[in-house]
Image (cartoon, rainbow, N blue to C red):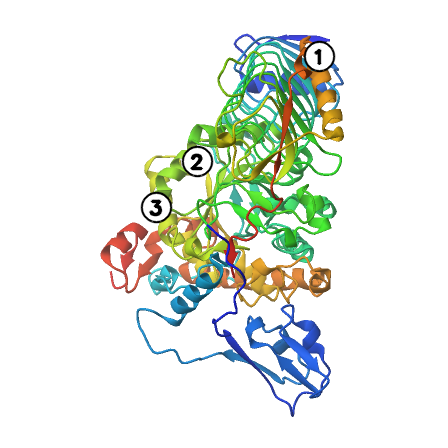
Amino acid sequence: MTKIDATDMLYRDLNNRIHTLADRGEKHIELRNVCGQKFIGDALKGDVKIDIYGIPGNDLAAFMDGPEIEVHSNGQDGIGNTMNAGKVIVHGHAGDVIGYAMRGGKIFVRGDVGYRVGIHMKSYKDNVPYIVIGGCASNFFGEYMAGGVMVLLGINGDDSPIAGDYVGSGMHGGVMYIRGDIEDRYLGREVKKLELDAEDHRRLSELVREYCAHFGCDYDEIMAKKFIKLAPKSHRPYGNLYAH
Amino acid sequence: MSTPGVMATQVPPEFTVEINERKCVRCKRCTTECGFEALTYSREYDAIVADDAKCVACHRCVTMCPKHAIRVTDNSLAYKANANFSDIHRKNILKQAETGGILLTAMGCDRDYPVLWDHILIDACQVTNPSIDPLREPMELRTYIGRKPDCLEFDPDSDPLKLKTELAPNLKLDVPVVFGGMSYGSVSYPVHKSLMLAAERCGTFMNTGEGGLHRDFYRHKDHVIVQCASGRFGVHEEYLNAGAAIEIKIGQGAKPGIGGHLPGEKVSEDVSKTRMIPAGTDALSPAPHHDIYSIEDLSQLIYALKEATRYRKPVGVKVAAVHNIAAICSGIVRAGADYISIDGFRGGTGAAPRVIRDNVGIPIELALAAVDDRLRQEGIRNQTSLICGGGIRQSSDVIKAIALGADAVMIGTSALVALGCRVCQKCNTGKCSWGIATQNPRLTARLDPEEGAQRLTNLLNAWSHETQEVLGALGVNAIESLRGSRERLRGVGLDEKTLEILGIKPAGR
């Protein structure tokens, strides 16, 4: 394991160190005193694990292809931007646009997330992305979603809605599992509410178990509440929009 | 809003197809050549029968008929003359009344807005300064795309003298023309291959567009610019590192401000593999990049890409020419873009709403002049290169663009025309008879990439020779010496304000 003290380090220097270590075959890197450095894990490959103490900056794990990053505090915007494979675990809250166009790998956030989380997430054959959010989400959760699986648990939420407006607006693929219910007025036009079937339950329980393992939560307590499933009404929502 | 049912159309056929029965030998070739199924053979009449309504005037049948027995003409159906409500307006209203849909079209704007290239003339040497004979004297067309340093520092103690300044990565172009972004999906596999081979042979670059790079083409990567657009189709670490440069696509001249929409019909198994989305689903590109809502955000994506490729490749940004393009480009340079591709409103597309294509954006000539001016005024012109496109049809357009301030131009439509495209504007249907804008294997097999590459190479060679001829006449021996040399241009038939924006004098002055 290699430790890096990121105090006063510019992101370019920090990321250069990480790349150099990973290229040399280092399997475990611990970053201390991280304070807003962007692009950590950007396009990083292989099976390296990075532990981050302090708050990493935007675009954490962007274009990442394999490694695991554990953030022991809050994260910022753009985590897992266009990520291909790997895992990101955030012990606190995270910002906007988490998992934008993500095509594979997993993101677990213990707390709440901001706007447009899971936007344009897509899957292709064995590449299926997963996002599990422990808290609540803001507007446009799963906008344009084209594939993959999102879970929203709403743990510790007060009486406010579990997600903001326009959930799944423009969704044309993939599936969302929401713990509790969402009033129809918060849903995008392209989304329908469904009951979970056996396959859904299997997938969901696997993800919730993994969530609990990372954050030390009680699986049964989480699963005691009923979930709903959100799926797109059509894989081609705009097929009839045009005249030729 | 209720969806209207299918109605019988009142829109008359746009073209009339005539088959000369005496010339026709009933070989039936035309019936298979037509991608739009406009021609069939009638056993009953022993004749080729045309369904005029399906004809798009792509001329595949006309070109391939061994007896030259087919003629396609405008269907000059006599509507009552009306200078305000033209035939086109009336037909479009009928189409919308029948479907309730957005009018979809393809390729560049076909309305008769003024083409400013055709109002600009180039200077030449006479008597007082000698012209150069390009056939017998060196004539340099090479140019470099990317950030240039503010100044050069040398190590005075070194012998030979060594450069101390670290140079940013640049693309080397042997000819100041690149192929503009056209995605695999909107165009076919053999089109991409033709463009790639031609780029390799001519020492220039093709641009993947936003649909990813087919696995077969990774070996041509040194002549490929990979695009990263809002849909992020086929974008991953390996793809980013495969290209010679990366281009963030913000906008496109044909459809500024709106997203892309590749219909499921064109998402074949192979396209699906390259885009990494399931076959048959619509590939929707959001209107904005949802991680870019500001110049600062753009800067973040630029540097995310630079980090992803460890600062080894230029990262450019493509934008559509819109009203405030000069200020926008100033921001893009400050965000860290190594080059900017500016696409004028006449730029092409595989599919766009007509209302956008024909009404949104500004001409590239004015956009280019305004941007070049602004960047010079701000002292940041060296920090970026400008590639402009959107209606470049001939070598004289290239020369005028460079004299106005471009480093290079990009061509899309011209390249497709070289490959056989007749600009019928039906790319969105996926039925292209020339195998260009289709994924139907029966049709794509018609385009031989080797021949395609040769046609494109010939085109660029011809433009290169012509450019050298004009440079010789100008008494200039390098294309880089002409860049921004607006004194060598004059306007004809342009108003004073337009001349002022173009930064050129009227002819006679």
Q: Position of residue A45 (x, y in %)?
A: 71, 25
Classify 10 Å Cα crowding around label 2: few (below 14), some (14-19), many (20 and above): many
Mark 3 — residue? B323
Kindly identify the amino acid type of the residue bearing the numbered disc 1.
Asp
Residue visible at 74% across and 18% down in the picture? A24
Disc 2 versus disc 3: distance between alpha carbons?
A: 15 Å
Dot 2 falls on which chain?
Answer: B
- Residue at screen point 34% across, 42% down: B324
Give the number of the mark in front: 3 or 1.
1
- Between disc 2 and disc 3, the foreground one is 3
Could you tell me if the residues under marks 2 and 3 are in contact, i.e. CB atoms within 8 Å? no
Tell me, yes or no, whether the two marked residues, 1 and 2, touch with CB atoms within 8 Å: no
Q: Which mark is residue A220?
A: 1
Q: Is residue B110 above or below residue B250?
A: below
Amino acid residing under circle 2: Ile
Q: Is residue A207 left or right of residue B485?
A: right
For numbered disc 3, what is the local secondary structure?
loop
* Amino acid found under the numbered disc labelled 3: His
Q: How far apart, in angstroms, are the residues tagged by discs 3 and 1?
A: 58 Å
The residue shown at (70%, 52%) is B268
- Badge 2 marks a residue whose secondary structure is helix
Alpha carbon distance from label 1 to label 2: 51 Å
Q: Which residue is mark 2?
A: B332
Pinpoint residue A205: horizontal percent, then vertical percent: 73, 21
Front one among A202 and A7: A202
Q: Is residue B151 left or right of residue A227?
A: left
Please determine whether, in this image, residue A141 is positioned above or below residue B239. Answer: above
Report the mark closest to the observer, 1 or 2.
1
